[in-house]
């Protein structure tokens, strides 16, 4: 603020100097075009001499007046003309008044006998005055321009430039770039304001770091719980299988209801196991700690995975081409298991599996014959936690993670996953890299 006051004071001083210069020049030239007092005295003296016309020429010559003048009578007849040269303009009282020549009447008592007119050309005086005014105006203009340049430079350096920096800084903050500080210049009149902006940036950066750390802790907690849940779920499944095996060994007719209930327990435990597995994989991916171990495997592993997950015997698979694929069998098993379970859950029809080799990839296409997915949802169903409108409205269980996990795993295994839907069901194509 001090620099601003100082600059305004300098500019004001320059303006005052400009006005003073102009006034001084105008004062020095203010007499141009005005009648000198000595000329008035001379005119009065000539008028007195002209009252007596006898020997007028000799008396005037003896006086040695240093001026050109004409003495006229009341009829504008020339009595005396001090001008020299052949070109003499005709002078009358009217022309003297028109040209603003100094003049005085010759008075005898109460009667006007004539007039003495001094031939005073004001053109030179006018030009002198005009030149003086132009010089003064030019000087004032230069001073004003200098003052404007000084003030403009100050405004640009201390107001506009800092505001532009703050504008750019605000844009970076809006984009989330909180690591670049706002540089504060010593002469910046908005120093305190800029410092507040930079403090805000530091607080936002610290808040974001705290939020990231908090989210990481939450994800680590979810991953830990998901991992810990798999142990009791596996125990429930094994216990259920054991109890069912003992019932089958007993062969009692009354044990049929118990076997059905054991199957329901196993099915629910299996659903929980799948959800926990997907949640665990999704959380690890968010933490950036999800790993895949790619190895060269026989394509026969795909058939084994399908057999393991097709507990309803709904899959109709073509022969798997005998090739070597580069994949992680555990993660590929998770992908195929999610696809089959989704088809069980939402279609409940036969599942056709076809294969073909194309551009270094083994394409595996699974197709069911259920209601399919609307075209406007195809690009969304592989997003995290997204469930189709029809599935959400039906009340069927699901987390919206199955296809998201499948796509994420295929990308990490250098493959891909594509979905499509027509009038005859829903299809998923897996592209597994060949070795």
Image (spheres, rainbow, N blue to C red):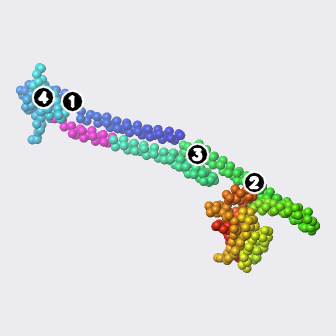
Residue under pointer 2: 218
Task: State the CA–CA distance, disc 4 to disc 1.
Answer: 18 Å
Mark in the foreground, 4 or 2: 2
Mark in the foreground, 2 or 3: 2
Do tag 2 and tag 3 residues touch (Cβ < 8 Å)?
Answer: no
Q: Verify whether residue 179 appears in magenta.
A: no
Mark in the foreground, 1 or 2: 2
Quadrant including the C terminus: bottom right
User: Which label belongs to residue 28?
Assistant: none
| Location of residue 311 (image quadrant) | bottom right
Q: Main secondary structure of the magenta part?
A: helix
Q: Earlier in the sequence, mark 3 or mark 1?
A: 1
Locate residue 201, reporting x and y percent.
63, 49
Locate residue 37, reporting x and y percent.
22, 29
Locate residue 148, reporting x and y percent.
42, 44
Residue under pointer 3: 194
Tag 2's secondary structure? Answer: helix
Mark in the foreground, 4 or 1: 4
| Location of residue 297 (image quadrant) | bottom right
| Camera sees residue 58 | no
Which residues fall within the magenta stretch? 117-136
Residue pictured at 74% horizontal, 73% vertical: 316
| Camera sees residue 396 | yes
Residue under pointer 4: 115
User: Badge 4: few (under 14), some or many (20 or more) residues near its Cα, within 10 Å?
Assistant: many
Q: Earlier in the sequence, mark 3 or mark 4?
A: 4
Which of the two residues, 364 or 372, is positioned nearer the viewer here? 372
Relative to residue 5, is residue 135 drawn left or right? left
Residue pictured at 13% horizontal, 31% vertical: 93
């Amino acid at each position: 603020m001090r620099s601003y006051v100082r600059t305004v004071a300098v500019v004001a001083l320059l303006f005052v100097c400009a006005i003073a210069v102009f006034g001084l020049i105008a004062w020095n030239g203010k007499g141009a075009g005005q009648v000198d007092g000595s000329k008035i005295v001379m005119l009065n003296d000539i008028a007195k001499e002209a009252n007596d016309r006898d020997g007028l020429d000799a008396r005037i010559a003896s006086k040695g007046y240093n001026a050109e003048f004409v003495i006229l009578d009341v009829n504008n007849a020339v009595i005396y003309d001090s001008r020299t040269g052949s070109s003499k303009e005709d002078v009358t009282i009217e022309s003297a008044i028109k040209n603003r020549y100094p003049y005085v009447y010759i008075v005898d008592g109460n009667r006007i006998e004539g007039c003495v007119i001094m031939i005073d050309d004001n053109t030179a005086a006018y030009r002198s005055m005009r030149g003086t005014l132009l010089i003064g105006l030019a000087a004032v203009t230069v001073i004003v321009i200098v003052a404007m340049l000084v003030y403009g430079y100050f405004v640009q350096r201390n107001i506009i430039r800092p505001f532009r920096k703050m504008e750019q800084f605000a844009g970076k903050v809006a984009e989330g770039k909180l690591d670049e500080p706002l540089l504060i210049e010593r002469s910046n009149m908005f120093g305190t304001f800029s410092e507040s902006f930079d403090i805000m940036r530091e607080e936002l950066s610290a808040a974001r770091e705290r939020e990231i750390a908090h989210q990481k802790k939450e994800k680590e907690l979810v991953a830990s719980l998901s991992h810990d849940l798999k142990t009791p779920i596996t125990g429930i499944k094994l216990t259920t299988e054991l109890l069912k095996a003992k019932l089958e060994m007993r062969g009692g007719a009354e044990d049929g209801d118990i076997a059905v209930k054991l199957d329901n327990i196993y099915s629910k435990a299996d659903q929980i196991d799948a959800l926990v597995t997907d949640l665990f994989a999704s959380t690890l991916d968010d933490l950036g700690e999800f790993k895949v171990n790619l190895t060269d495997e026989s394509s026969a592993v795909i058939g084994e995975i399908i057999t393991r997950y097709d507990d309803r015997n709904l899959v109709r698979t073509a022969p798997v081409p005998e090739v070597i694929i580069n994949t992680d069998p555990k993660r590929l098993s998770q992908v195929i298991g999610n696809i089959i379970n989704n088809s069980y859950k939402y279609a409940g029809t036969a599942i056709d599996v076809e294969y073909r080799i194309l551009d270094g990839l083994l394409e595996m296409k699974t197709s069911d014959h259920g209601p399919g997915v609307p075209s406007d949802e195809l690009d969304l169903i592989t997003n995290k936690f997204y469930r189709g409108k029809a599935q959400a409205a039906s009340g069927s269980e699901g987390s919206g993670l199955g296809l998201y996990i499948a796509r994420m795993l295929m990308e990490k295994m250098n493959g891909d996953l594509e979905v499509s839907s027509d009038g005859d069901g829903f299809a998923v194509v897996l592209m597994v890299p060949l070795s």
